[in-house]
Image (cartoon, grey):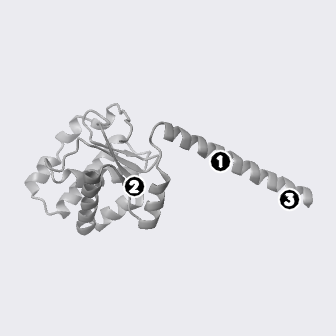
Amino acid sequence: MRKFKNVFLAVILLTVLYCSIYHGTKYYIAVRADRAVPPQAYLHHYIHNTPYIEGPPEFREDVKKALATIQKVSPEQYEEICSYAVIIRQINSRITKSGVAWADTLHNQIYISNDLSVELNPYQLLTTLVHESKHLSQNQHMDAEQKEREAVLAEKTLLVALDVDHAIIKQLINEQRFESRWWEEERTFPASP
């Protein structure tokens, strides 16, 4: 019995050691790539059930306003953002040539470029948050185009809930949007500010 107990404890110790090394290495690699989620983000997410927002004060304020608007007009989409996005970060450049945002499904992060302009398009931040959070919630084995179509449909659902004129919705969301196949562009991951 004593020998069994010692073997059992040794197996548990080796398992804990293996998991520590494995996850520690993954975290170290993520830190070196500046894509690791800071511990305070997890703490904020689990206490407040909202994403931690990282960036300059104006960006944080814009995101908070956008989340409040989404919560008011589309509680389901707000819940999806809060459930899946641990952190929303502003970055200093675009991730792709045409994209202003990217969802990191491995670390549950949404990156938003500082090129995104709330002044030029008042719906852009709202639809970007909904679009990217849809990617965080999707099955990762889906076809890339299908993922994009679902994310764009989530944008359309939000715009309808916001009572945006159908002509504007048609202008923002149409088949021409899929012709560029932006989801196939090469991505570059800059450091966060």
Q: Position of residue 15 (x, y in %)?
A: 71, 50
Q: Which mark is residue 85?
A: 2
State which tag comes first along the sequence, 1 or 3.
3
Q: Position of residue 151 (x, y in %)?
A: 30, 50
Q: CA distance from mark 2 to mark 3?
A: 42 Å
Q: Position of residue 56 (x, y in %)?
A: 30, 49
Horizontally, is 164 left or right of 27 in the view?
A: left
Identified by mark 1, the residue type is Ser
Identified by mark 3, the residue type is Lys
Q: Secondary structure at mark 1?
A: helix
- Identify the residue position indicated by label 3 in the image: 5
Q: Quarter of the image containing the C terminus?
A: top left
- Identify the residue position indicated by label 1 in the image: 20
Q: Nearer the viewer, residue 18 or 47?
A: 47
Q: Could you tell me which residue is drawn at 48 percent across and 60 percent down?
A: 43
Horizontally, is 37 left or right of 97 in the view?
A: right
Q: Secondary structure at mark 3?
A: helix
Q: CA distance from mark 1 to mark 3?
A: 22 Å
Identified by mark 2, the residue type is Ala
State which tag comes first along the sequence, 2 or 3.
3
